Image (cartoon, rainbow, N blue to C red):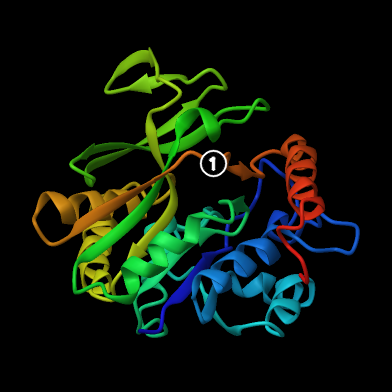
């Protein structure tokens, strides 16, 4: 069965500054996305859909998309701004981004963040699962929290509760410090380094779009649209609670790398540069 990689690339990158999705990490101008797509293609994905903002389309295609389209089928989806209230510039969140793909993505698909490096091994189990997945048979890759934190500031993570290899619940937690300190469940705590977290590497089947349609309508009617976000992990967690889906959890102990802050950039360059020197990305 064909499988699609959906890349969420519409984020503003306000803490980073600039179009961080296209920030070069190699001397010849390649960015994290070049390596994520390389890994996904090696795992068996045969198409990439980039979710971007319409105002960034020309820059994104020039800096990233046109190069990647030489190696794999590429399509673009614009994350709509029609529901943004006056004064809000930030998109309405990851759930809304995926919902914008409803008319484009017709196969089982994985989603990733454009500015995250998930590691070469992350895509294989997800793709194998999706190739035979039936309606509502979702999957995710869970990382150890300690392998995903930034020493340069706080981060947001989806904290996962699992049982017998399947997801029971995911809770979005913001402002997690470099030592795992945060407010979780209304209390100040320090999360263990091996706490499983979602980094938005999900494997989904197309029935998710009907679920997103209903949940997005509820969000628009009840949320504070000036500040609230429509998160895909929250939608999936509710689908599990209501019996509409199951989520197989694949645990990954690799180090995750991402660019939340500009100061994160050098660590990403060093890490991927090391993988290149080790021969992992020959021919890219």
Residue 52 percent across, percent down from the top left: 58, 70
* Left or right: 270 as drawn, with respect to 41: right
In the figure, residue 59 lies in which quadrant?
bottom right
Residue 254 image offset from top left, x and y in percent: 54, 41
- SS at mark 1? loop
Residue 265 on image: x %, y %: 76, 42
What residue is shown at x 26% (from left), y 54% (from top)?
Answer: 248
Label 1 crowd (10 A; few <14 / some 14-19 / many >=20): some
Outermost residue toward the left? 243
Is residue 51 at all visible to an observer of this figure? no
Residue ID at (64%, 41%): 260
Q: Nearer the viewer, residue 175 or 162?
A: 162
- Please tell me in which quadrant of the rendered image residue 144 appears: top left
**Who's the residue at 57% across and 63% down the image?**
10
The residue singled out by tag 1 in the image is: 254
Residue ranking furthest to the right? 27
Q: Using the image, determine if residue 223 lies above or below residue 60.
A: above
Q: Is residue 54 left or right of residue 204?
A: right
Examine the rendering and report whether any part of residue 241 can be seen. Answer: yes
Q: Residue furthest front?
A: 279
Closer to us: 255 or 67: 255
User: In the image, 61: left or right of 120?
Assistant: right
**Residue depicted at x 59% and y 69%:** 53
> Where in the figure is residue 92, as x and y percent of width and height?
44, 57
Q: Is residue 222 above or below residue 213?
A: above
Q: Where is 179 relative to 112, above or below?
A: above
Nearest to the observer: residue 110 or residue 251: 251
Name the quarter where the C terminus is drawn. Answer: bottom right
């Amino acid at each position: 069965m064909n499988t699609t990689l959906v890349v969420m690339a519409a984020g503003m990158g306000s803490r980073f500054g600039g179009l961080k999705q296209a920030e070069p990490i190699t001397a010849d101008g390649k960015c994290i996305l070049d390596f994520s797509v390389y890994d996904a293609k090696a795992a068996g994905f045969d198409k990439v859909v980039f979710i971007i903002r319409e105002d960034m389309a020309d820059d994104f295609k020039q800096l990233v998309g046109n190069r990647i389209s030489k190696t794999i089928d590429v399509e673009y989806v614009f994350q709509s701004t029609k529901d943004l209230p006056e004064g809000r510039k930030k998109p309405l969140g990851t759930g809304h981004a995926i919902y914008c793909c409803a008319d484009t993505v017709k196969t089982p698909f994985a989603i990733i963040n454009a500015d995250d490096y998930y590691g070469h091994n992350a895509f294989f189990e997800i793709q194998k699962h999706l190739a035979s997945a039936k309606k509502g048979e979702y999957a995710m890759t869970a990382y150890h929290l300690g392998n995903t934190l930034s020493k340069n500031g706080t981060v947001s993570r989806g904290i996962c509760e699992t049982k017998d290899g399947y997801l029971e619940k995911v809770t979005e937690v913001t402002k997690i410090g470099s030592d795992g300190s945060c407010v979780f469940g209304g209390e100040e705590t320090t999360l263990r380094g091996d706490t499983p977290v979602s980094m938005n590497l999900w494997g989904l089947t197309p029935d998710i779009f009907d679920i997103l349609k209903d949940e997005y309508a509820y969000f628009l009617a009840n949320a504070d649209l000036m500040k609230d976000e429509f998160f895909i992990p929250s939608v999936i967690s509710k689908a599990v609670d209501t019996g509409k889906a199951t989520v197989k959890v694949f645990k990954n102990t690799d180090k995750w790398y991402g660019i939340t802050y500009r100061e994160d950039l050098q660590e990403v360059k060093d890490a991927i540069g090391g993988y290149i020197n080790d021969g992992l990305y020959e021919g890219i």
